[in-house]
Amino acid sequence: MSKIKKTAVTKADIWLISILIIASLTGIFFSIKTLKNTSEKYCQISVDSKVIKTITLREGYTEKITIETENKDNNLKNIFFKNPDTKNLKSYNIIEIKNGTVEMIKADCPDQICVKSGLISIPSQQIVCLPNKVIVKVISKDENEDELDDITR
């Protein structure tokens, strides 16, 4: 039978592991800071596959947009913007743009998936309200940023 020799962790091992962890965390931190997205971002609002408004996302800018649609037999008749008052509307979605983020804060759709989507701020993120045919997405001025990262088969 062979004897297994146990080795203890020395102070030098602890120092080496600590230095490696600190170096890797520093590298991650600096890569995140230097590779941060600096291109201009926009919020694009589409209803029934038609772009109706594009807004620049920036810090300090706040706006509430109400999208009203009149649906009769699922045909889109009118699209118009009003103040965020939801009385006497056929279908509505209220979108809030605040400090570079976009959120659907209220809608009259039955499932409320669009409202539960939360905040979006990264290019290619989107909020979709299928019953009202509303799509809100963040796009980038940089064309390469909106492309796919990888293709799988």
Image: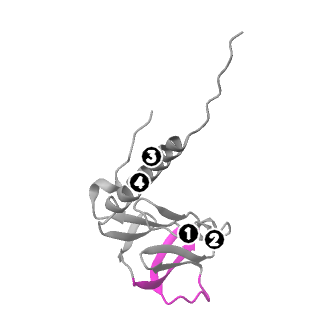
Mark 3 and mark 4: Cα distance apart in space: 12 Å
Question: In terms of sequence position, does the residue under pointer 4 or pointer 2 come before the other?
Answer: 4
Disc 1 marks which amino acid?
Asn
Residue occupied by mark 4? 28
Callout 2–callout 1 Cβ contact below 8 Å? yes
Majority SS type along the magenta span: strand
Q: Is residue 24 left or right of residue 75?
A: left
Q: Is residue 9 left or right of residue 38?
A: right
Disc 2 marks which amino acid?
Cys
Residue occupied by mark 1? 132
Callout 1–callout 3 Cβ contact below 8 Å? no
Callout 3–callout 4 Cβ contact below 8 Å? no
Callout 2–callout 3 Cβ contact below 8 Å? no
Q: Secondary structure at mark 1?
A: loop
Q: Secondary structure at mark 2?
A: loop
Tell me what residue is drawn at x 63 percent, y 75 percent.
Answer: 108
Q: Which mark is residue 20?
A: 3
| Foreground label between 4 and 2 | 4
Mark 2 and mark 1: Cα distance apart in space: 7 Å
Q: Residues within 10 Å of mark 1 (few under 14, many from 20)?
A: many
Magenta stretch in the rendered image: 60-89
Question: In terms of sequence position, does the residue under pointer 1 or pointer 4 come before the other?
Answer: 4
